[in-house]
Image: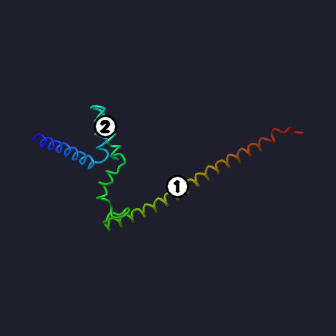
Amino acid sequence: MTAATTTTSTNGFTGWVHSAIAWLDARGRAAWITLMVLGFILFWPVGLAILFYMIWSSRMSGSACRRHSARTAPVGPGLTGNAAFDAYKADTLRRLEEEQAQFEGYLQRLREAKDKAEFDAFMEERRKAAAATTAAAPEDQPDS
C-alpha cells in the first residue's frame, strides 16, 4: 500500500512539475526569466538550478517559444491570410516607399540649395575682400 501511495504522490509531483513547465512555456521566455530571477532573489541555488535547467533544455534558445508560435504562424511570408488586409498593407507600403523617395529627393535638393547659397556667400565675401584690397592698394603707393 505504501508503494502505491508513493507512486501516486510521485506521479502527482511530476504531473505538477510538467503542468508548471507547460504553463511557463505557454507564457514564453519572459516567464522563465522571471522565475529564474525570483529564484535568485529567494534562494540563489534555486535560481541557479532554474538557469541550468533553462540552458540544458534549450529554453533560452527560444525553440520552446517557436514551437508555441508555430501554431499561429501566418499563411506565407508577410501574409496574414486576409486578402483585403494584405492588399491594403501592400498598397500602403508602396505608397510609403514612394513618399520616402520623394522626401529624400526633397532633402537632397535642400542640401544642394544650402550648399549653393553658402558657396555664393563665400564668393561674394571673397570678391568684396579682393575689391577692398584693390581699392586700398593705390592709396598705399607713393605719389611721384
Q: Hey, which quadrant is residue 35 in on the image? A: top left
According to the picture, the residue beneath numbered tag 2 turns out to be: 49
- What's under tag 1, amino acid-wise? Leu
- What's under tag 2, amino acid-wise? Ala
Q: Where is residue 124 in the image (x, y as percent from the top left)?
A: 67, 49
Horizontally, residue 14 falls left or right of residue 47, namely left
Of label 1 and label 2, which has the lower sequence position? 2
Q: Which residue is drawn at 12% across and 43% down?
A: 4
Q: How is the image coloured?
A: rainbow
Q: Residue at x 11, y 39 (%)?
A: 2
Q: Residue at x 58, y 51 (%)?
A: 114
Residue 47's place in the image compared with 84, above or below, is: above
Q: Label 1: state its secondary structure.
A: helix
Q: Do the residues labelled 1 and 2 touch (CB within 8 Å)?
A: no
In the rendered image, the quadrant that contains the N terminus is: top left
According to the picture, the residue beneath numbered tag 1 turns out to be: 107
